[in-house]
Image (cartoon, rainbow, N blue to C red):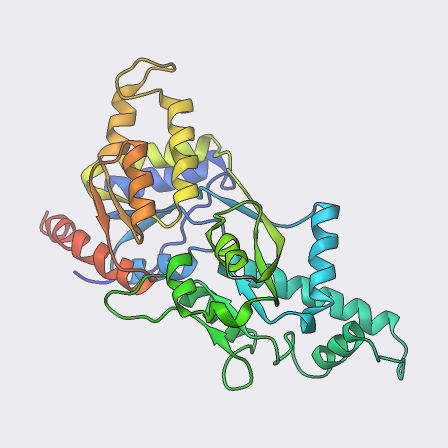
C-alpha cells in the first residue's frame, strides 16, 4: 500500500456546499478506505495527517464544538481560582481542552496584571505573590502539582513548558493495559494527604462527578471551575452530503469515536435526520440510517463503546488509548480494503 499525499479533511459546517460535496464524492468514488473523524474542529489534524500518510482518506465530521467559557459567573470563579493558585495543594485537569483554555486565561490575566500593576508594587499577599512568581518564570507556579487524566493533557502542559523537573505532573501510567480515565487517575493520587486541603478541578460545563465526589469523600475541599463549553454542532447540508457519499459504501468507512458525549450527540443527530432503523419515527429513511450504522466504529474506552452500542452501532472495535493505538487499529482494518483498491 503506497502512501499518498495528505488530504486536508473538509470541515463540517464550514466548507462551501458545492465544492466540499463534489470533492468528497469524487474521493468516495475511488473506493479507498476512509476514517470519519469526530473530534472538535482543529483537534483531529494530527491523526488525519498520520492516517493520510498511511493511504487512508479522512472525513471530518465534528460531533463537539468547544469554546472558551463566556458566562460571567463562571469566568469570575475561574479568575478567582487562577489568581490564588498558591492556596491549592493540587490542580486537576480533566482534558487537553481544560489545559489549553486555563493556560490561555492565565496568560490573559497575567497580561492584565502587567498593565495594571506598577513596578515595585507591594506584593505581600498570597495572590500578588503568586502572580509575581508566574510573571517572572512561567504560566504555572512550580509549588502547585498538577494531575491529568491522560497523556494528551500532559503533552499540552509540556508544550507550554509545564513539565518535570520544575513542575510535578501526575498522569496514569502507560503500557499495554493502560487506562486514561478518572478511575486510573484517582489510583495515582495520595488521597489521604489531600484531607483538609484545597484542590482545584478544571473541566468544561458538566462532566462526570467521580473525581470531585471521591476527592470530597477523602476530606479535600474541591473547587470546580469551568474553563470551556461543549456544545453539539449542527452539521450543514454539505457535511451531511459528504458523510452520505462516503457511507454509501459502509464497508470502506470507519467511525473514529473518542468521546461518549460526542456519540450521544451523533445518536440525536441521526434520529432527527433519518428516524430510526425500524422506520417507526419520522423522517423515515431507515435505509440510509442502516448504511451509516453498518460502518465499523473504533473507540478507545469501554464507556465510548457502550455509547456507540446504545446509538445502534454493532461493529465496534475497542483499542488501547492513544492516537498511536487508534492509528495501528485503523491501519489493520484498512489494509485489506486498500489492497483490493490497488488491485482494481
- Quarter assignment of residue 55: bottom left
Vertical placement of residue 17 versus 224, above or below: above
Residue 133 in the figure: left or right of residue 247:
right
Vertical placement of residue 70 versus 79, above or below: above
- Quarter assignment of residue 140: bottom right
The quadrant the N terminus occupies is bottom left
Residue 181 in the figure: left or right of residue 329:
right
Vertical placement of residue 234 versus 85, above or below: above
Give percent across and percent down for residue 285.
31, 18
Vertical placement of residue 53 versus 16, above or below: below
Give percent across and percent down for residue 107.
69, 68
Q: Residue at x 32, y 61 (%)?
A: 179
Q: Residue at x 32, y 33 (%)?
A: 311
Observer able to see residue 193: yes
Residue 329 in the figure: left or right of residue 240:
left
Observer able to see residue 61: no
Give percent across and percent down for residue 121.
90, 80
Q: Residue at x 22, y 34 (%)?
A: 294
Give percent across and percent down for residue 113.
81, 70
Nearest the viewer among 169 and 253 is 169
Q: How many numbered callouts?
A: 0
Residue 214 in the figure: left or right of residue 323:
right
Amino acid at each position: 500500500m503506497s502512501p499518498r499525499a495528505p488530504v486536508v479533511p473538509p470541515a463540517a459546517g464550514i466548507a462551501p456546499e458545492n465544492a466540499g460535496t463534489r470533492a468528497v464524492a469524487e474521493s468516495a468514488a475511488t473506493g479507498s478506505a476512509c476514517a470519519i473523524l469526530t473530534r472538535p474542529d482543529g483537534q483531529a489534524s494530527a491523526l488525519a495527517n498520520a492516517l493520510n500518510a498511511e493511504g487512508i482518506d479522512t472525513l471530518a465530521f465534528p460531533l463537539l464544538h468547544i469554546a472558551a467559557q463566556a458566562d460571567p459567573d463562571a469566568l469570575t470563579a475561574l479568575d478567582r481560582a487562577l489568581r490564588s493558585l498558591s492556596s491549592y495543594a493540587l490542580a486537576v485537569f480533566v482534558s487537553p481542552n481544560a489545559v489549553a483554555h486555563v493556560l490561555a486565561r492565565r496568560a490573559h490575566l497575567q497580561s492584565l496584571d502587567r498593565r495594571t500593576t506598577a513596578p515595585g508594587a507591594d506584593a505581600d499577599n498570597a495572590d500578588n505573590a503568586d502572580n509575581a512568581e508566574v510573571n517572572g518564570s512561567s504560566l504555572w507556579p512550580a509549588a502547585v502539582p498538577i494531575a491529568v487524566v491522560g497523556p494528551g493533557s500532559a503533552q499540552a502542559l509540556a508544550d507550554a513548558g509545564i513539565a518535570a523537573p520544575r513542575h510535578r505532573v501526575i498522569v496514569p501510567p502507560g503500557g499495554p493495559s493502560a487506562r486514561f480515565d478518572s478511575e486510573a487517575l484517582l489510583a495515582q493520587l495520595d488521597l489521604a494527604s489531600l484531607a483538609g486541603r484545597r484542590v482545584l478541578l478544571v473541566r468544561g460545563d458538566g462532566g462526570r462527578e467521580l473525581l470531585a465526589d471521591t476527592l470530597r469523600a477523602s476530606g479535600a475541599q474541591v473547587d470546580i471551575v469551568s474553563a470551556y463549553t461543549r456544545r453539539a454542532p449542527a452539521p450543514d447540508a454539505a457535511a451531511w452530503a459528504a458523510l452520505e457519499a462516503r457511507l454509501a459504501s459502509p464497508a470502506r468507512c470507519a467511525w473514529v469515536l473518542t468521546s461518549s458525549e460526542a456519540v450521544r450527540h451523533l445518536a440525536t443527530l441521526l434520529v432527527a435526520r433519518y428516524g430510526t432503523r425500524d422506520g417507526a419515527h419520522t423522517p423515515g429513511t431507515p435505509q440510509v440510517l442502516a448504511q451509516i450504522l453498518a460502518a465499523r466504529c473504533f473507540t478507545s474506552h469501554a464507556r465510548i463503546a457502550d455509547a456507540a452500542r446504545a446509538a445502534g452501532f454493532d461493529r465496534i472495535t475497542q483499542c488501547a488509548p492513544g492516537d498511536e493505538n487508534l492509528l495501528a487499529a485503523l491501519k489493520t482494518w484498512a489494509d485489506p480494503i486498500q489492497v483490493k483498491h490497488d488491485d482494481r
